[in-house]
Image (cartoon, rainbow, N blue to C red):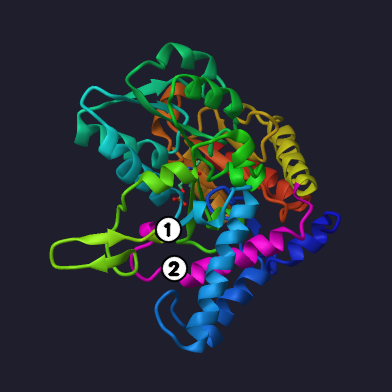
Amino acid sequence: MTDFNAADFRQCFPALSQGQCYLDSAATALKPQAVIDATVNFYSQDGATVHRSQHHAAQTLTQEYEQARALAAEWINAPRPADIIWTRGTTESINLVAQSYLRPKLQAGDEIIVSQAEHHANLIPWLMLANQCHAHVITLPADKLGLPDINALPALLNARTRLLAVTQMSNVTGAMPDLARAIELAHANGTPVLVDGAQGVVHSPPDVRQLDVDFYAFSGHKLYGPTGIGVLYGKSELLDSMDPWHGGGKMLTRASMSDFTPQAVPHRFEAGTPNIAGVIGMAAALKWLKTVDLPSAERYAQNLASLAEEQLSQLNGFRSFRTQNASLLAFDIAGVHHSDLVTLLAEQGIALRAGQHCAQPLMAALGISGTLRASFAPYNNEQDVTRLTAAVKYALSLLAD
Ligand code: PMP
């Protein structure tokens, strides 16, 4: 690992070569050259399938595919590579747990606790499941800062609670709840915990063993990897006890016209030809990340968000929803609709997102209809902050006319 140097880091991202002002990394991160190269090499030279064909390229690629699993396990300190299931992303990982782990156990009247700060990816699968099984989703409220209120948890846990679903980091406010405490409380009630790590894995990669989390889900594309690839980590004993969700090729050891025997974990959960290019790109991202001083890079991005917050707070009506020094800065300006402002910013070449950020219950808790969100990554710089502030000022001047 080398010391973090912002200019060198930025150089790794060809998408920024024309000086783009990209402040939408919480939606998806730009890709470093190492990931682009690995993907191009796969399609131009190594193209083959995995776990099927006997020819040389297919065998080599199968090894790479499995080595990538080991890298992902290492990234979050999972005990064994087999505890890593490749999925399409956080969304699919959570649906897998809902359908494969919880559905067979869920009885009518059972309860699933879901925080009000969740992205829809960690809410809708539980609502769907609750509907399917006549169970109930119980709200763990978000506090004034948009933080899941862990203090409210003891009163919600009971003999019917079958799972707690909570985020590691809000994609709106950047708030990070005290997960260790939430997990301890849930476990004391015999309740397993699923953590949505889509944002958290980027800013604060967890040690899943130390955290003692039961399931942890994340996406490759926010972690500088390709889209369409993600991870579900699960404790070995839980994964081993789960039936497959998707059926198809290579997830079984024997099939007849009347039944089949599923493969061992993880292959039991990876039916069909997988996203091989995604896994290869993900491995490249994880190898590249090992060369980065992540804590320094994160501090640098947080400082940029602080600077932006400081500059924008000079503007009348500015309100920040940022918590805990996050590198995400959600904000609004009194009297200005976020969708008008984001359009005027887009016209000035500023890439950020506005709206409800797939978190409508959190918007309701905060009493707002939406926000703008500037999300900073270590490839941003102070010029991006200056451009954002200038563009917001100019947009406001247009709207005031
Ligand atoms: N959870 C959070 C906190 C997120 O920010 C996102 C992506 N916006 C997701 C879940 C869903 O991730 P994906 O769309 O990659 O499945």
> Local crowd at mark 2 within 10 Å, few (<14), some, or many (≥20)?
many
What secondary structure predominates along the stretch shown in magenta? helix
Q: Residue furthest right?
A: 3
- Calculate the distance from the C-alpha at mark 2 to the C-alpha at mark 1: 8 Å
Work out whether residue 267 or residue 167 is closer to the camera in this orientation and state it.
267
Task: Residue type at mark 2: give it.
Answer: Asn
Residue receiving disc 2: 275
Residue toward you, 290 or 30 = 290
Question: In terms of sequence position, does the residue under pointer 2 or pointer 1 come before the other?
Answer: 1
Is residue 281 within the magenta segment? yes
**What kind of element bears circle 2?**
loop
Which label is found at residue 88?
Answer: 1
Mark 1 near ligand 1 (CB under 8 Å)? yes
- Residue 396 screen position, x and y as percent: 59, 39
In the rendered image, residue 228, in percent from the top left (x then y), is placed at 45, 61
Give the image quarter of residue 291.
bottom right
Highlighted magenta segment, given as a residue range:
268-294
Q: Is residue 167 shown left or right of residue 175?
A: left
**Residue in the image at 53% along x and 64% along y:** 226
Q: Residues within 10 Å of mark 1 (few under 14, many from 20)?
A: many
**Residue 116 appearing in the image:** yes
